[in-house]
Amino acid sequence: MGAVRDVAVVVLGISLLVFIALFGHVPGLRNTPIGFAHRFLWKTIPRWFFALDRAVTCGRLGPVLMGTGDYLMNEKHPIIMAFYLTLVTGGIYMFTKDGWKHLSLIHRMCIPMVATLPYITMYLAATSDPGFITPENHQRSLQCYPYDHLNFRPGNICRTCQLAKPARSKHCSICKHCIAKHDHHCVWINNCVGQLNTRHFLAFLAATNILLSYGLYLSFSIIQSFIVRALIPSQIAIGTLPWSVYLHLFGIAIVEEIYIGAVFLLCALTGVLSFAFTTYHLYLIWAGTTTNETIKWSDWRDDIKNGDILLADPEEDDDITELDADEMCRDWPRVTTQLFYRIDPTNGGDIPRGIIWRRVQGLGEIDNIYDLGWGSNFRDALWPRDFNAR
Ligand SMILES: [Zn+2]
Ligand SMILES: [Zn+2]
């Protein structure tokens, strides 16, 4: 039992650390122990390191680490892609080396297809156009979504691209371009995820999940049959073993069939993260939002909690529905009809008069005009309007 417990603790520990490092910044986790641990990992520990460096080496290591960190975080590089491909290739090699002889013909035929998918979908996602906004397609990109006057307002010019930012777009400092309907810059595909390549990104996630599930199923089956074949008497059915005995034998089988055991642990370890990440992205599409927008919505939630958001009821002042009259031409069936006022230090709380305001109590009162219902949201994500096409 000791071996199994040690393996379980290591697997759990590494999973938690990777989860905190990669997902701790997600707005929903901001004020949870995961969010605090994320800030500790990325802010407090580096601060301690720099203080130690100043005391011990007079700050010689700091610039080197800063330069490396800056390159890793802010430049396009294929290091994480290479890491992913090494894990996949290494996993497939380890599995086929010891597992191939245990497989039936049907699995021998399926494995090449399932194992090839991550390479193909990663290539497609990495080389796809996420929706780069250029002087040529800029006017058409402006027509895709109206400004919601909440998270996206007209008149913002990107200082790098020198173009007016379309609604839902964001400048990616790594790709050095404004990206239409920007979701996030994905280090796993070394590319942005945006309006035109969300489907490539989802295909890559799906291929990864299929490979991990299939790898988990096959390695588990082989470990299971090893227990039956080599570790228990033939007259005892494996299903009748007590859990403690079964887990003990499972630990022995992992050590005995070390390559298959390693694949099992690898699939179990990374599968949880991959499925969680995929579920989160499917949820974002379902809700008609993006990773970039959830950060903005999270700020709204905090301001609502502080009582800083006021809403003018359209029935009290019909004129405000004319706010977006100039945007009705855009290729989107919804425009905002709500008028909000955000109390913050820059406006000194100088609330406009002549409008009847009420304090917003919850995020549900704020209309997300980019949410058309889950069916249309998925259609918009998977079959996007290509503003490059003339
Ligand atoms: Zn830009
Ligand atoms: Zn990018």
Image (cartoon, rainbow, N blue to C red):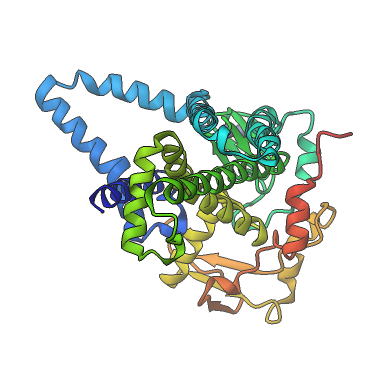
Judge left or right: residue 384 versus residue 73: right
Judge left or right: residue 31 versus residue 331: left
Residue farthest bottom in this picture: 316
Judge left or right: residue 367 versus residue 230: right
Q: Which quarter of the rendered image does ligand 2 occupy? A: top right
Q: Is residue 228 above or below residue 353?
A: above
The x, y position of residue 291, in whole percent, is: 56, 50
Residue farthest left in this picture: 55
Question: Which of the 4 quarters of the picture holds residue 285?
Answer: bottom right
Q: Is residue 126 above or below residue 9?
A: above
Q: Is residue 235 above or below residue 337?
A: above
Out of 144 and 86, give the one closest to the viewer. 86
Is residue 237 at all visible to an observer of this figure?
A: yes
Question: Which of the 4 quarters of the picture holds residue 253?
Answer: top left
Is residue 349 at all visible to an observer of this figure?
A: no
Out of 6 and 300, give the one closest to the viewer. 6
| On-image quarter of the N terminus | bottom left
Out of 263 and 247, give the one closest to the viewer. 247
Residue farthest front in this picture: 235
The x, y position of residue 54, in whole percent, is: 14, 26
| On-image quarter of the C terminus | top right
The x, y position of residue 244, in whole percent, is: 31, 62
Residue at 59% across, 67% down: 340
Out of 212 and 177, give the one closest to the viewer. 212
Residue at 79% across, 38% down: 139
Q: Is residue 186 above or below residue 384?
A: above
The x, y position of residue 119, in whole percent, is: 64, 29
Residue at 61% across, 52% down: 290
